[in-house]
Amino acid sequence: MANREVLSSRTETLNKYLKLDQKGSIMAEYVWVDANGETRSKSRTLDEKEYKPEDLPVWNFDGSSTDQAPGENSDVYLRPCAIFPDPFRGSPNIIVLAECWNADGTPNKFNFRYECNKAMEAYADHDPWFGLEQEYTLLDHDDRPFGWPIGGFPAPQGPYYCGVGSGKVVMRDIVDSHYKACLYAGIHISGTNAEVMPGQWEYQVGPCVGINMGDELWVSRFMLARVAEDYGVKVSFHPKPMKGNWNGAGMHSNFSTKEMRAEGGMKHIEDALKKLEPHHAECIKEYGEDNEQRLTGSHETGSIDQFSWGVANRGCSIRIPRETAAKGYGYFEDRRPASNADPYRVTRVLMTSIFGKL
């Protein structure tokens, strides 16, 4: 409690400075994804005006400090690709999502956005919609989930999913702060809920079209880490943060094309699943680290070694919502991606598995 009081006092002090006149300048927070699938950022001052990504300066950082380049050739370039209003510093300040490029003009090997965007542009005529369900766990600095007793375990799963009330959910203040920050920034966040394991939450982003899905999901992750920083809390995207009889954490990926969303779309959904099945192993490679700890065939998952699908079945690789089956058109949910999966890799492999590799 004392730590939360200190953080509250510091926030009040910070707000005093955030209200100061910026004298015609703005702060631009450049955000990128490092070699370990985590967001990094740094700030620069720009003249106050309206910007498009192509108007912003290309910048650089020390890639040897992020495992993205060797020390003897350490400059990695940041090419802006999307802009969002900054909920932490307020208008007119901005958050700039940037791709990482090498000095020789090639995309950095950890720049998965580049290949994803090629696929989205190649198959844009299908008007692909994505909706990602991002699960995560809130940890204290001892890496134990909040709400778990010291040296012990909480009561078995059951009351926590979409729970309300003390003893069932914790850290709702972080969840709501993040929700508001995403709305302010223009992220298409569509909802939140407490998850099955205590200390675990989920938010959903989408529907988003094409490359926008990966862009918005990555910025929403940055914002979650940034909000949790203000509260002195750690965020874990590990797919199995606690061993034992507890649900893991996934990033269920909802997908549709204009053909699937139209009358008779169920045939296009079934055709897509037939095309996905032979690419199961390839998809799993793109769906996050340590996912074998989560995809066990229990705890609402399918087996990592077997592709399966069913209507309203959360124990399958792919779930077709009952409403979609009843109407005969709609979308499907790929339940295989782990919570730490890169959304660019997930959305790209879905597209290339269904429509063909580029």
Image: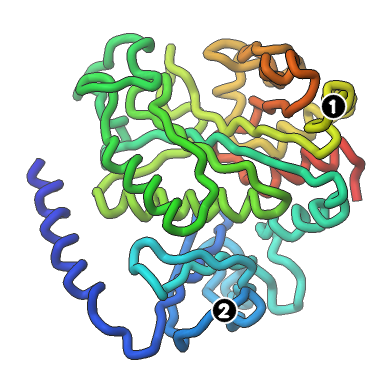
Numbered tag placed on residue 263 in the rendering: 1
- Residue visible at 23% across and 22% down? 165
Viewer-side residue, 266 vs 315? 266
What's the amino acid at mark 1? Answer: Glu
- Residue drawn at the location 62% of the way across and 74% of the way down: 53
User: What amino acid is labelled 2 in the image?
Assistant: Tyr
- Nearer to the camera, 72 or 229: 229
Mark 1 element type: loop
- Sequence-first disc among 2 and 1: 2
Which-is-in-front pick, marks 2 and 1? 1
Contact (Cβ within 8 Å) of mark 2 with mark 1: no
Secondary element at image label 2: loop
Residue 326 x %, y %: 73, 13
Of residues 67 and 349, the one drawn nearer to the viewer in this rendering: 349
153 relative to 17, above or below: above
Vertical comparison of 243 with 113: above or below: above
Q: Position of residue 207 (x, y in %)?
A: 63, 42
- Could you tell me which quadrant the N terminus lies in? top left
Please indicate, yes or no, whether residue 181 appears anywhere in the rendered image: yes
Q: Quadrant of residue 54?
A: bottom right
Q: In the drawing, what numbered circle is on residue 51? A: 2
Q: Which mark is residue 290?
A: none
Kindly indicate the quadrant of the structure image that contains residue 126: top right
Q: How is the image coloured?
A: rainbow
Q: Is residue 287 left or right of residue 180?
A: right
Name which residue lies at 52% across and 74% down.
62
Q: Is residue 210 left or right of residue 46?
A: right
Circle 1 packing at 10 Å, graded few (<14), some (14-19), many (20+), is: few
Furthest-left residue in view? Answer: 2
Which residue is at 60% across, 42% downward? Answer: 206
